Image (cartoon, coloured by chain):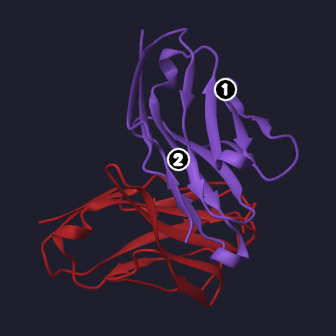
Chain colours: A purple, B red
């Protein structure tokens, strides 16, 4: 079965600092990868996704993520965060028909950006 | 389009009560799903549906029933509520049933079982 690990549960940083959130998954086959964001009091929204091609994908609001197949990782980055990036971030994996086309989420990382 | 809508937003139940969480989407999406969100555990899939009349179990289906009589609606029924079902419930939909499809989430229902 597929699983997703987000090692940082809480991250606190100041505005303009760089952000990197780790995501590792366990599945030996082809996967489709997603990062979702949940702002306080709101529902989940898609930040970016990776299916194939260039392993560096760019999403909304200046976020990007890099897929490293050999490390089973899909880390999220933003060069300079803003106070409005305070949210919870979820990595998710879909391993396709072989795994029932189910979206599996990591435990989430709460990010607090101090003004 | 209203997107994915969920009612109610908040609900308090007593142990043993039953209730239905409503979910509707107006995007003609084939795939719909229910997740529960618990602190530190991310979102876990309860049930999903790949089209009207077709449903299947997810990771944590026990204590929940679903049906999909129309493309638009995907209600989640709690048969006999338990405190362990205290959670935030999210409904999601996607255009197709492929693994590359983005899922769109509703605003959630916060359920407390006393």
Query: Which chain does the numbered disc 1 sit on?
Result: A
- Image-quadrant location for residue B83: bottom left
Front residue of this view, candidates B8 and A12: A12
Residue B70, given in percent of the width and then of the height, sits at 62, 83
Secondary element type, mark 1: helix
Instruction: Name the residue beneath numbered marker 2.
Output: A44
Looking at the image, which residue is at 48% across and 16% down?
A: A83
Judge left or right: residue A83 versus residue A31: left
Please provide percent x and percent y for residue A15. 49, 10
Tell me if mark 2 has few (under 14), some (14-19) or many (20+) residues whose alpha carbon lies within 10 angstroms of its own. many
* Residue at x 49%, y 77% (from the top left corner): B58
Q: In x, y percent, where is residue B25?
A: 61, 65
- The numbered disc on residue A61 is 1
Foreground pick, B57 / A71: A71
Q: Is residue B72 above or below residue A55?
A: below
Q: Label 2 is found on which chain of the structure?
A: A
């Amino acid at each position: 079965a597929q699983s997703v690990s987000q090692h940082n549960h809480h991250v606190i940083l100041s505005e303009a600092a760089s952000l990197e959130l780790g995501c590792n998954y366990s599945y030996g086959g082809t996967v489709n990868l997603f990062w979702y964001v949940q702002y306080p009091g709101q529902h989940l929204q898609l930040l970016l996704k990776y299916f194939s091609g260039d392993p560096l994908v760019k999403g909304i609001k200046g976020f990007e993520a890099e897929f490293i197949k050999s490390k089973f990782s899909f880390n999220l980055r933003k060069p300079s965060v803003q106070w409005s990036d305070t949210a919870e971030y979820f990595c998710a994996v879909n391993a396709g028909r072989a795994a029932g086309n189910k979206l599996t989420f990591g435990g989430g990382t709460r990010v607090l950006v101090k003004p | 389009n209203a997107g994915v809508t969920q009612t109610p937003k908040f609900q308090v139940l007593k142990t043993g009560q039953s209730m239905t969480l409503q979910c509707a989407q107006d995007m003609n999406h084939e795939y719909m799903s229910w997740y529960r969100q618990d602190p530190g555990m991310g979102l876990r899939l309860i049930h999903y549906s790949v089209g009207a009349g077709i449903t299947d179990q997810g990771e944590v289906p026990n204590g929940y029933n679903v049906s999909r009589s129309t493309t638009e609606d995907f209600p989640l029924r709690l048969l006999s509520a338990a405190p362990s079902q205290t959670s935030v419930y999210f409904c999601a939909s996607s255009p197709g049933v492929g693994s590359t499809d983005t899922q769109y989430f509703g605003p959630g229902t916060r359920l407390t079982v006393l």
